[in-house]
Image: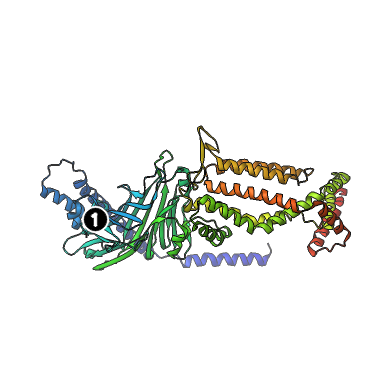
Amino acid sequence: MDRNSAIGLSLILAIFFGFSLYNQPSDEEIAAAKRQNDSIAAVEQQLAIEAEKARKAVELSTAAVDTLPADSTLSDSALAVAQTQRYGAFAAAAAGQDGTIAIENDLIKVELSRKGGHPYRVTLKNYQRNDSTPLVLFEGDQNRFDLEFFLDNRVINTSDLYFNPSKDALTVTATDSGQVSMRLPAGEGRYLEYVYTLRGNSYLMGWEVNMVGLDGIIQKQATSLDLRWECHLPSQEKSLENQRNASTIMYRFSDDEVESLSEREPAKENISTDLQWVAFKQQFFSTVLLARGRIEAPAEVEAAWLETDSSEVKTLSARLLIPYGHKPSESVGFDLYLGPNHYETLSDMDRGLEKIVPLGWGIFGWVNEYAVIPVFNLLGGLNLNYGIVILLLTIILKLFLLPLTYGAYMSTAKMRVMKPEIDELNAKMGDKDPLAKQQATMELYRKAGVNPMGGCLPMLLQMPILIALFNFFPASIELRQQAFLWADDLSTYDSILKLPFVIPFYGSHVSLFTLLMTVSTILYTRMNASTMNMDNPQMKQMQWMMYLMPIIFLGVFNNYAAGLSYYYFLANMITFGQQYLFKAFVDEDKLHQKLQENKKKPVKKSNFQKKLEEMAKQRGLEQPKGKKK
């Protein structure tokens, strides 16, 4: 270090220490900060003590009622005191009459519980379970749809209290205004009220939460009420595994983006953004809570299940906030969708609910939305068996793809008639210089006017449709419980044989449509293998993989929708027919003669081809130099 550097470094250190000393707090400032910290600690300690007192008060008041034996001889007056300690202004609602009030139209029947005032059972009239019993979306006391809030130091949950229905009739139909009010009294002129209204003859039901006169009794610090929503999904279909893989919680943010919890493993998510709706999605049916404004953040959603429980698909739960502003009278409005995952029904609501139906992401979803679904619905409107509908859909799609299929066949035919010349070239050049052999092969193809990738491009263009249908058929509720041939339900697997044991990666049943699909795919692979150059080790490996894939699909598709395997089988069989027709109309001798004539014509190289050749030549020149070194 020279003299100037040493002086500069010394000055920097002097400035640094001088600045630190100048900004060092005085003794008075240190003492003031200590007093402030001590005050904050004292307030936090006092808050903790108050919270503990509130918790113990809740426990004691709860014990005063909840621990009473069923045959308690406690006097009415003593019981009233205990209930007042527990429920405060809502003490009068601690006892009441059990039972339900039903509200229904031609599509759904919703039974509302007097205790808790929530939907107790929802029945979809036009659907049945796999065992032919009425399809119940959810039912029972295990399913929660309750509000929870603080009343002084008490925690009040509406599931413990009895609501008074506005109508004494056991059933209220859609023609009879289709509306029922469930009111929870809290003293003179004060009440919490749920108003349920069926939206005509639809799967939509309005839910109004009216809070009247509660501003003087709900804890002043509260800015919201907690909605505790929990649903134990019953098994509706043949395959429990398929139901679990399709059931989850989905939610839409205020910016229209839709997200969901993982379907394959238990999941929990804390959401910090306002929501438009939250859906408890099953394989073919859903319960959706839709805000008329927004569901304020934060929210918490969770999905879990017991692997050993074969009667329950999953337990879905959500904790949401209902805003409360301590006004003399407040109302918050929601809608409940209680119905099938039918794409058009959900789309017509114009709330983004069609995203519940898993059509695939990106281009695959667009293919389903704008091509497959319109054609499928058009054919379904002809009142044909859905096995015939799938057949007609397959024919239409294959006709649409016919130009691509023909292009792929012609490319394969050209490769086939050129194979003897390629074999001769390979034998002549051997394996000493693979790069030179590759260049010579490409030059031969170029002169003959053959594109080696010509058969791959049409196949790649067909892939979006194949993948789109992979998503469409298992999610199509139209196929649910639709029988065809030996399959009693095209939306799930078709079992022709129940095995007394489980085969890993395959299962304990035999699906005939999956077997037919696998055999037809292997035959199609064998038919195409004759055009490959088996002298190339890479081609041999590719052929081995092509035979392996159908075997893998045999295990994957064995538990999938029979409609999907049936479609792939039909597509293979129609492709066989097209191949034989092409073969009958394409004279390969004339094709070979035409290719030979092409070889005599001057070849115009594209700039891209020239660039590739220059790169190959440069690479060939660099290799000997590397060896000399």
State left or right for residue 524 relative to residue 389. right
Quarter assignment of residue 4 = bottom right
Q: Position of residue 500 (x, y in %)?
A: 50, 31
* Tag 1 residue: 153
Q: Position of residue 459 (x, y in %)?
A: 67, 54
Residue 352: tell me if it is visible: no
The secondary structure type at the circle numbered 1 is loop
Q: Position of residue 203 (x, y in %)?
A: 37, 59
Q: Looking at the figure, which quarter contains the N terminus? A: bottom right
Task: Give the crowd class for mark 1: few <14, some 14-19, many >=20 residues within 10 Å.
Answer: some
Residue pictured at 47% horizontal, 59% vertical: 343
Viewer-side residue, 434 vs 22: 434
Viewer-side residue, 517 vs 551: 517
Q: Amino acid at mark 1?
A: Asn
State left or right for residue 357 relative to residue 58. right
32 relative to 99, above or below:
below
State left or right for residue 19 relative to residue 416. left
Residue 170: tell me if it is visible: yes
Instruction: State the count of labels.
Output: 1
State left or right for residue 165 relative to residue 454. left
Scheme of colours in the image: rainbow
Q: Position of residue 462 (x, y in %)?
A: 64, 56
591 relative to 241, above or below:
below
Residue pictured at 60% horizontal, 57% vertical: 396
